[in-house]
Image (cartoon, helix red, strand yellow):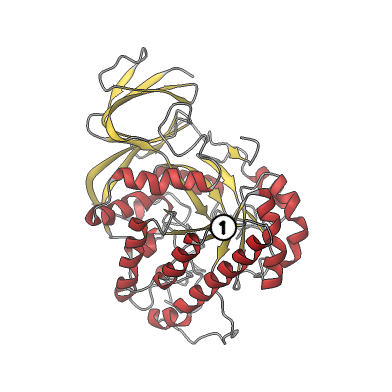
Amino acid sequence: MSEFALRSQRVITPEGMKPATVKIANGQIAAVLDHGADPGCPVEDLGNKVLMPGLVDTHVHINEPGRTDWEGFNTATQAAAAGGITTLVDMPLNCIPVTINKAALEEKLAAVKDKLWVDCGFWGGVVPDSVDDLDELLDAGVLGVKSFLIHSGIDEFPQMKEADLRRAMPILAKHGAPYLIHAELDPDNSEPAEIGESYQSFLASRPKQWENDAIDLMIRLSREAKAQGHDCRVHIVHLSSAEALANISAARAEGLSLTTETCPHYLTLFAETIPDGKTLFKCCPPIREDHNREQLWQALKDGIIDFIVSDHSPCTPELKHIDNGDVEKAWGGISALQFSLPLIWTEARERGFTLTDLAALMSTATARFAGLDHIKGQLAVGYHADLLVFDDSVEYAICNDMIKHRHKITPYVDKPVCGEIQRTYVRGNLVFADNQFKNGPLGQPLLKDKL
């Protein structure tokens, strides 16, 4: 691969934003030089556009193999590239088979061949009947595993009970791998609520207390495991309840290995403005009130929430019941993989966040969480040349024609945003520019201990 360099007045480095010239050679960042330095190779001046590390999105449902009518690796990773995401980590559901053993992982690895436009790691899953397969699955290269504490939406991925969690957590601790938890707990096994088209009825059907109780359970089990010599890295996915923040903070102060994430939909949308019958807004846990949203933003500022990921969870328009507005029956999931950065930047800049802050929250911290921080998530010498060029001043409204994921639906249509991804490089290869995909699917699978 030939050497080249990119120069900008605004380059986001581990030391902050500064004028610099970034030299790229053999797919890696070879040097970060002063702005006016001669890199000894062809150099392009980007002017005042921001050159920043490619995003690392560690929560993406791609659904291949088995449910490619919902999404697939080709379209999902194209959407990622269009959104400046250079690395993603795929969830163990809703593919068929679910990724709960080595054989299922091998099927998924076969499915990704020649389809990856960005680099891709994989989470495994653990369900009650697969705990005995967990060692082998982790040895096979998944970056960690996920479980649900409530019905996942698909019967082949049942929830874990306390006894199951106690069996799994020492295994995760032994491997030093994160344990991702969908934290909703319905201790009363509630009868399904009558929701119909009402968003407020759906919101009431999945109260904050379900999240709070699930998180408290994981804190208690983490404390128990640690007392027995097992330091399990518990991670709460897609946090939506701000009521849980105090207990999360206290658990961390106690020394428990507890991290959490939230998502653009919890930070940019709020329940008071969601109309009835608009099924595209349905997700689990639900999008909550504006006051709750502001508390999540403050928790990001305070470092209680560790990072931001998309939780791209697509399905077919039919499963979303778009035409009849049946919120009760609609599949729960938000499709918005490529819009994370402009959505977050639009809101974050009003709250005093900088693009350097967002690089930390959407690249550096996520790479660290997935165990990829020695090669991903920073614009630094020796790291993969995963870069995006961002014009942070362009304003526009999201429209269906922009969408690169499989089904051209998202709750963000007509939403005004600021910031445009103009180019994306994966390991020095230009994969997206001028709203076009370039050079073919050159992404690679990322397996633990094989990087």
Question: Between residues 289 and 119, which one lies in front from this camera angle?
Answer: 289
**Residue lying at 39% horizontally and 79% vertically, measured from the top left:** 199
Report x, y in % for residue 132: 78, 59
The kind of residue tagged 1 is Asp
Report x, y in % for residue 431: 44, 34
Classify residue 30 as left or right of residue 228: left
Q: Residue 231 falls in which quadrant of the image?
A: bottom right
**Residue lying at 71% horizontally and 52% vertically, measured from the top left:** 104
In this view, 391 is above or below 169: above
**Residue lying at 47% horizontally and 57% vertically, measured from the top left:** 312
Secondary structure beneath dot 1 equals loop
**Location of mark 1 (residue):** 69
Classify residue 342 as left or right of residue 69: left
Q: Is residue 177 visible?
A: yes
Question: Between residues 67 and 201, which one lies in front from this camera angle?
Answer: 201
Residue located farthest toward the right when viewing the structure as drawn: 132
In this view, 118 is above or below 272: above
Report x, y in % for residue 346: 26, 54
Report x, y in % for residue 58: 51, 50
Packing grade of label 1 (10 A; few <14, some 14-19, many >=20) is: some
